[in-house]
Image (cartoon, rainbow, N blue to C red):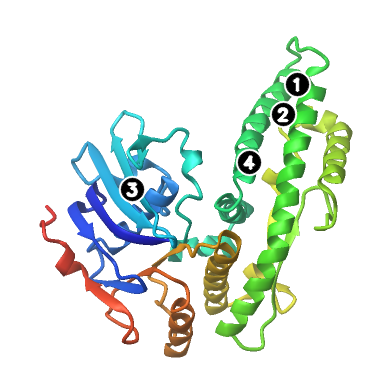
């Protein structure tokens, strides 16, 4: 998948800007605050209907503007053209128009334009709360598996409804006695499907991750383990068996869950355990090791998408080279040279001769106010 052109209007600090990258690696360079990251976020919006720094659409409005619009055109590896237009106005629902047809719900669009991102703020995936790692794995799988995304959205709805029922039971409000059994059945079926898909993903992804990490590091042994709230579940455990385990667990913990008015077990409580040389990385790793681990996760996703979809995803890498030495920067450029189209932001103009470099000064043809 390649970006042919994107135009951003009233988006972040850009009044109007147009950007056309090269087919390989394009380095966007310029001073801090010049709007480099905003270009990547505009592309990310076209691919996943949201930015990667903030989830709130209003945060992307240019100061004093009441709307923003994005127009992107993309070419697949079989030369198929996809046009994406996103319009956001204050106090109105965001519009997504793909190939001149409005798309609702937005989840139908996910996966059409596969992409991976790197942002320094995403270091929380490695050393932050479990929710950050769940978001990482959910986003990763959703771009390659439509059923997973549908199950995930359904699970969140059922989880909300089940928690509301638990609160009603705790308050001793009149509720039909079979209602909780019905919600237990629904949530167990969805939870089993999600956990089974996550386990299959981790197994396949880990192989590519370890290979790629070896290209960026020496004498370090990384690993990823899925930590399930049910206890030990292996990739060979059938989805039907996981379903039965969830159903049994909900029956066992019924009184506790009613008392707490919350569902205590499920994929919303699971985590990924990142290890380096047998130790949990967020407890023992240096800042350099944390950053290398994150970069490896993201670049391994590129390989996973390519092999799964038969389509190289867009790579959107924000400030990836800061705090890296020359040797590691060279290694990353070598890997990216095989990754299809890659957009990188940097405060400095750098890179080998095959990299297309574009300065922000050349793009800001309409001055920012």
Which residue in the structure is indicated by mark 4? 152
Residue at image point 29% right, 77% down? 356
Closer mark to the observer between disc 1 and disc 3: 3
Residue 75 occupies quadrant: bottom left
Q: Is residue 80 left or right of residue 139?
A: left
Q: In this orientation, which residue lies closer to the viewer: 12 or 7?
A: 7
Q: Which residue is mark 3?
A: 83
C-alpha distance separating marks 1 and 4: 27 Å
Q: Nearer the viewer, residue 119 or 6?
A: 6
- Nearer the N terminus, badge 2 or badge 4? 4
Neighbourhood count class around disc 4 (C-alpha, 10 Å): few under 14, some 14–19, many 20 upward = many
**Residue bearing the label numbered 1:** 170
Q: Are marks 2 and 1 in contact (CB under 8 Å)?
A: yes
Mark 2 lies on a secondary structure that is loop
Disc 1 element: helix
Which image quarter: residue 153? Answer: top right
**Side (left or right) of 18 relative to 248:** left
Position of residue 268 measured from the top left corner of the image (x, y, whole percent):
67, 44
Q: CA distance from mark 2 to mark 4?
A: 21 Å
Q: Position of residue 45 (x, y in %)?
A: 38, 49
Mark 1–mark 3 distance (CA, rounded to whole Å): 51 Å
Label 3: which secondary element: strand
Residue at position x 38%, y 62% from top? 2
- Tell me which label, 3 or 4, sits earlier in the chain: 3
**Outermost residue toward the top?**
174
**Sequence order check, earlier mark of 2 and 3:** 3
Residue 280 screen position, x and y as percent: 70, 70
The 10 Å Cα crowd at callout 1, few under 14, some 14 to 19, many 20 or more, is: some
User: Which disc is residue 261 wearing?
Assistant: 2
**Alpha carbon separation for disc pair 2 and 3:** 45 Å
Does 53 appear above or below 77?
above
């Amino acid at each position: 998948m390649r970006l042919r052109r994107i135009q951003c209007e009233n988006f972040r600090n850009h009044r109007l800007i147009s950007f056309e990258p090269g087919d390989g690696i394009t380095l966007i360079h310029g001073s801090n605050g010049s709007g480099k990251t905003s270009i990547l976020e505009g592309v990310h919006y076209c691919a996943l209907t949201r930015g990667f720094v903030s989830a709130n659409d209003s945060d992307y409005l240019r100061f004093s503007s009441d709307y923003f619009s994005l127009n992107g055109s993309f070419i697949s590896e079989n030369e198929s053209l996809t046009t994406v237009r996103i319009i956001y106005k204050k106090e109105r629902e965001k519009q997504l128009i793909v190939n001149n047809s409005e798309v609702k719900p937005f989840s139908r669009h996910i996966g059409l334009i596969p992409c991976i991102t790197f942002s320094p703020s995403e270091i929380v995936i490695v050393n932050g709360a479990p929710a950050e790692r769940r978001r990482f794995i959910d986003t990763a799988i959703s771009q390659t598996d439509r059923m997973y995304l549908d199950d995930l959205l359904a699970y969140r709805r059922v989880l909300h409804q089940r928690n509301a029922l638990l609160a009603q039971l705790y308050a001793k409000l009149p509720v039909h006695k079979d209602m909780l059994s019905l919600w237990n059945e629904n949530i167990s079926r969805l939870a089993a499907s999600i956990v089974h898909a996550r386990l299959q993903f981790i197994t396949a992804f880990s192989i590519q991750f370890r290979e790629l990490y070896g290209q960026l590091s020496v004498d370090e042994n990384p690993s990823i383990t899925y930590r399930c709230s049910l206890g030990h579940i292996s990739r060979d455990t059938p989805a039907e068996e996981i379903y039965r385990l969830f159903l049994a667990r909900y029956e066992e913990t019924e009184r506790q869950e009613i008392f707490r008015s919350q569902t205590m077990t499920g994929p919303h409580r699971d985590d990924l355990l990142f290890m380096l040389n047998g130790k949990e990385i967020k407890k023992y790793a240096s800042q350099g090791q944390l950053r290398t681990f994150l970069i490896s996760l993201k670049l391994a996703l590129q390989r996973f998408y390519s092999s799964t979809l038969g389509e190289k995803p867009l790579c959107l890498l924000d400030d990836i080279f800061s705090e890296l030495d020359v040797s590691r920067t060279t290694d990353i450029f070598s890997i990216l040279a095989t990754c299809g189209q890659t957009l990188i932001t940097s405060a400095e103009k750098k890179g080998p001769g095959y990299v297309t470099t574009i300065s922000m000064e050349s793009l800001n043809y309409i001055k920012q106010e």
